[in-house]
Image (cartoon, rainbow, N blue to C red):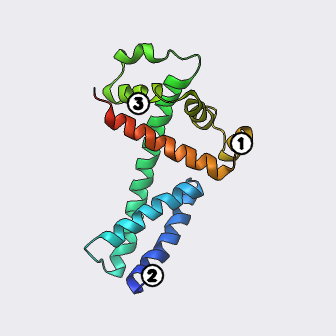
Amino acid sequence: MRLDGYEQQIQNISLELTSYLIQRGAKLEVAEDVVQDIFIKVLEMDLILPPAEIKPYMYQMAKHQYIDYCRRQQRFQTILEKYLRPAAPQIQTVSQVNPLEKKIVRAIKHLPRQDQQLLIQKYIEKRSIEEIAEIQQKTPAAIKMRLYRLRQKLRKKMRDTHG
């Protein structure tokens, strides 16, 4: 893929943004995901910003994207801890939670036990991908893909769940 000057400049800024996010506490893979989203958004924009404006714009986008990512992860973590912990009161208390939590609880409830266990290992026990792969005798890439597909499955189930 050949990049013209503007795209090359955006790519160079993207590399800086990855380092910037890592310095702010992001893990490498999260920083790369955030920067990739920004890179694509900037390239898809109809507006071409002058060089003096594109860099601050991309830094601002990176900051906001990372904050949004952290908030989503924190909400997801809270809900998973609340409903997947073995000692926690499970689905019986659904009527006492907000509508978003109800959707998530229903989606989690319909997951196979194996998928629930993977969520517990990753988000409750806070195990690394490598640890989970070792426990399940799979490759880290396979575990990452299962987690990705599991999150996609949860999103789909939540969209399909009414009420």
Q: Total number of numbered labels? A: 3
Mark number, residue 104: 3
> In the current view of this chain or complex, which residue is farthest to the left?
46
86 relative to 153, above or below: above
Residue 84, given in percent of the width and then of the height, sits at: 54, 25
Quadrant (top left/top right/bottom left/bottom right) for the C terminus: top left
Alpha-carbon span between mark 2 and mark 3: 41 Å
Q: Which badge, 2 or 3, comes first in the chain's sequence? A: 2
What kind of residue is marked 2?
Answer: Gln
Seen from the viewer's position, the closer of residues 13 and 132 is 132
Residue bearing the label numbered 1: 131
* Residue ID at (36%, 21%): 97
Alpha-carbon span between mark 1 and mark 2: 38 Å
What kind of residue is marked 3?
Answer: Ile
- Circle 1 crowding by C-alpha within 10 Å: few under 14, some 14–19, many from 20: some
Seen from the viewer's position, the closer of residues 102 and 159 is 159
Secondary structure found at label 3: helix
Residue bearing the label numbered 2: 8
Q: Are marks 2 and 3 in contact (CB under 8 Å)?
A: no
Mark number, residue 2: none
- Circle 3 crowding by C-alpha within 10 Å: few under 14, some 14–19, many from 20: many
- Circle 2 crowding by C-alpha within 10 Å: few under 14, some 14–19, many from 20: few
